[in-house]
Image: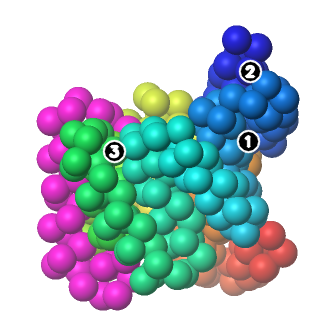
Amino acid sequence: VISIVTANLGNVFYDQGKVKQARTYYEDALKINRRIDNKRGMASDLGNLANVLQVIGDLAGSTSAQEQALQAFRDVGDRRGEAVTLSTLASILLDRGELASAQQKYEESSTLLQQIGFRRGQVATLLGPAAILEDQGRLQEARANALKALALGKELNDESSTASSQWQLAKIALDEGNPVEAEALARDAAEKFDREKSVGNGCSSNALLGRTLLAQGKLKEPQTATDVARALCERGQDQSARFQLEIAAAEVEFKAGHIEESLRNLNSINAA
């Protein structure tokens, strides 16, 4: 019971974007479960810890923790935990640029999720490959995957999954040269993430919104969007979201003729 309460406190901080505080609680919960040899609890705690490490940019540590969680879920026969962990491990590999390995893990996760009928988990196994396809320039295929994820998120009435799908579709639309469509999608995603109190995702979606507005030749509105994104990033500790913010802010400042400020944004990325 103590380990569950401790992990739940970690979840509260994680949802608020306070991942360093969440890490402390997850590590404490893991110590308790190791002491009593609760393998299922250990698997969950390792997965939570891996999520924190991914957010703060420690991808090697995150990979290691997620691989330990995967083995622990397999040891106790928790197929849902195994499937979800495979998907999360794939997202870490994607962040590391290991696209082939990420695709393999997404496929393993998707197969297992279909076998056990856990449809909510299938959203990630559609969006992850969509991001890979986008990175490869296969935008039509990426869009098809993201649209499937969006339809599934709406069917399940899962606002977080719907918002994530809209964010991915906004990125694809911007790549396709459709900034108006991208703006609508990014704006809707940002509003949903705000209702969900998802700080890191809110930062990312507002940063993307700024880029879509800039692509339409606007100057004032992109600055407003990146200001909102910065305020959200400062409340959390998501390094990936901050990276996306600084890229968008640098583009906005450059278009406005603020070269030094643009360089300052880019330098902050290099310093992170």
Name the element at disc 1: helix
Sort mark 1 into few (<14), some (14-19) or many (20+) by Cα contacts within 10 Å. Answer: many
Q: Quadrant of the C terminus?
A: bottom right
Disc on the earlier residue, 2 or 1: 2
**Residue 113 visible (yes or no):** yes
Where residue 53 appears, x then y in whole percent? 72, 54
| Image height of 34 relative to 256, above or below | above
Disc on the earlier residue, 3 or 1: 1
Q: Which residue is mark 3?
A: 121
Name the element at disc 2: helix
Inspect the image, locate mark 1, and give the three-letter code of the amino acid beneath it.
Answer: Val
Inspect the image, locate mark 3, and give the three-letter code of the amino acid beneath it.
Answer: Gly
Disc on the earlier residue, 2 or 3: 2
Q: Residue at x 70, y 11 (%)?
A: 1
Q: How far apart are the alpha carbons under marks 2 and 3?
A: 25 Å
Q: Residue at x 29, y 48 (%)?
A: 113
Looking at the rendered image, the disc whose residue lies closer to the viewer, 2 or 3, is: 2
Looking at the rendered image, the disc whose residue lies closer to the viewer, 3 or 1, is: 3
Label at residue 19: 1
Inspect the image, locate mark 2, and give the three-letter code of the amino acid beneath it.
Answer: Ser
Q: Quadrant of residue 260?
A: bottom right
Q: Which residue is mark 2?
A: 3
Dots 2, 3 in contact, CB < 8 A = no
Q: Residue at x 84, y 29 (%)?
A: 35
Where residue 103 appears, x then y in whole percent? 38, 74
Chain part drawn in magenta: 132-160
Q: Residue at x 33, y 78 (%)?
A: 134
**Residue 47 visible (yes or no):** no
Sort mark 3 into few (<14), some (14-19) or many (20+) by Cα contacts within 10 Å. Answer: some
Is residue 151 rendered magenta in the image?
yes
